[in-house]
Image (tube, rainbow, N blue to C red):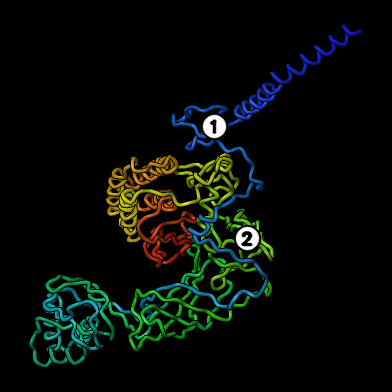
Amino acid sequence: MKKYIIYIGILVACLLLGWILFGGTSNKETDHNHDAVAATNQMWTCSMHPQIMQPEAGDCPICGMDLIPAESSADGLLADQFKLTENAMALANIQTTIVGKGNVEGNTIKLSGKIAENEEANAVQVSYFAGRIERLNVSFTGEEVRKGQLLATIYSPELYAAQQELITAASLKEPQPALYKAVRNKLKLWKLSENQINQIEETGKIKENFPVYATVSGTVTKKLVEQGDYIKQGQPLLKVANLNSVWANFDVYENQINLFKKGQEVMITTNAYSNKEFKGKVDFIDPVLNTKTRTVTLRVVLNNKDDVFKPGMFVTANIEGVKNENKESLSIPSSAVLWTGERSVVYLKTNPDQPVFEMREVTLGNQIGNKYEVLEGLFAGNKIVTNGTFTVDAAAQLQGKKSMMNKDGGKVMTGHEGHLGMDNNSSKRETDHTNTNERLEVSEKFLQQLNSVYNEYINLKDALVKEDSKSTSTSASTLLNNLTKVNMKLLSDNKAHNQWMSLEKEIKSSTTSISKASDIKAQRDHFKYLSSHLINAVQLFGVNEKVYVEFCPMADNNKGAYWLSKEEKVTNPYFGEAMLTCGEVKQVIE
């Protein structure tokens, strides 16, 4: 019995000793194995090609860059939602507004237009006989002339011969009265007065040079001949405009036509007289729609006896009493809306306590004042972005979420297919260090080099405004040259380096296409892509001045297009003089 007790004691002692010696090791091995499994689950991706996902570190099979760890922790957001940091919110000055029901504010519509000459009061001064201009009494465009004023003196061989005929016919007046009458009528058709004809007949002297008198009073808007020119019968000499009344022509969008009628009272304002308002009435609404701009012309006739309005001057019309049949409707500020093709989108702030956003497509009604009626897509109480909308949209694109240019989410193609973007994997690996929504810190020297690219872009934009295709090509070539001087080695941060590498490629591609195109329409088509990528560059890196992001909903065949500007005033590079002021400022980048 003692022997069995000793055996049991030895067994217990051995088990106890084994646990002491090996028990801790087993736990460590378990922990180590757990860590190994965790390490095995770590995925690696490429910052330039986020569709690449590999289980271990290495090189990107597409571009050869080092792979970086992909963040695996879930952020608790829905598939279409994305988040901004507080720093990004403050930097872009993003503001939100709660959508509420109520009357559309003001019942006043604002229209932009331009002063033009009153065509009904215009006249063309012509010569009624052929000859050579011996003396031209009008010195310059803009000169005032009065009815009956001597405009020019003309030598006419035909008129010289006709005077000789009159003198001969006068001597045969009794036997051949029909011939005499025919010769006099011929001179009358050449606008010689009775007194002039009688003087020739009575004196029997032929005048070599004949005067041309003004038939109307007004302002000379164009000289069509110079002294010494040979002219034909009926050839225009001068264009004369009576500016005692002028036209104010305004573009009315297709969805606003039903809001206007002849006789509506209009209050006109202009920057030249900022503290004055001028009354007028709608005189004419063009019955034909301009298919290029999708607008009709609304005309107001203005009294201009005090010479207040100058042809070409920009004016604004405030038309009150616009009836809104939807007496209670949802309305949102126009700054909240982004357009692309037939789609209008806004961004909702879905979480009241956190900067979480989601794109929402909406159907809009009429624009009244600075607001739009919302027919579908929003409800009272929704909170939407009203300032910094473009920045939020750029963040959505970079995170691979639904956006203005990418209605289905996922990777947005670069190049001539859309804005720069990433696929859904990019949102999974976003950290505070690599947040794509924040302004990237770069050196002052890099900013100066980027600024030279931006400045030449502005020159290119201005050339498109003037519809000067040759200057546009020249500016594009200069921009390309400035782009080659941007030193990528100045970007020490891997994130900034990767972003610029991608943007530089697309900017170069679009600009090269502009430089090679000779047709202004083709240049404008490439310009929208150049603008898209340069906007992203300015968003990410900034430049050494304030930048305005402007948008025209009518550009690109009504799909809408953006551009950058140094000034708040809109001058449209996609239409030029055809629709110079179409557009609005969508964002200000400090």
Q: Which residue is mark 2?
A: 363
Q: Position of residue 115 (x, y in %)?
A: 38, 76
Residue type at numbered disc 1: Trp
Q: Position of residue 95 (x, y in %)?
A: 55, 63
Q: Position of residue 127 (x, y in %)?
A: 22, 77
Apparent side of residue 205 relative to residue 177 in the rendered image (left or right): left
Is the C terminus in the top left, top right, bottom left or bottom right quadrant? bottom left
Along the viewing direction, whichever of 258 and 151 lies nearer the viewer = 258
Is the N terminus in the top left, top right, bottom left or bottom right quadrant? top right
The answer to which quarter of the image holds residue 507 is top left
Q: Marks 2 and 1: in contact by CB < 8 Å?
A: no
Crowdedness of circle 2 by 10 Å Cα count: few (<14), some, many (20+)?
some
Going 53% across and 64% down the picture, which residue do you hit? 335
Q: Position of residue 528 (x, y in %)?
A: 42, 52
The answer to which quarter of the image holds residue 174 is bottom left
Residue type at numbered disc 2: Thr
Apparent side of residue 562 relative to residue 334 in the rendered image (left or right): left
- In this rendering, the answer to whether 59 lies above or below 414 is above
**Does any portion of residue 580 appear in the rendered image?**
no
Q: Which residue is mark 1?
A: 44
Along the viewing direction, whichever of 217 and 84 lies nearer the viewer = 84
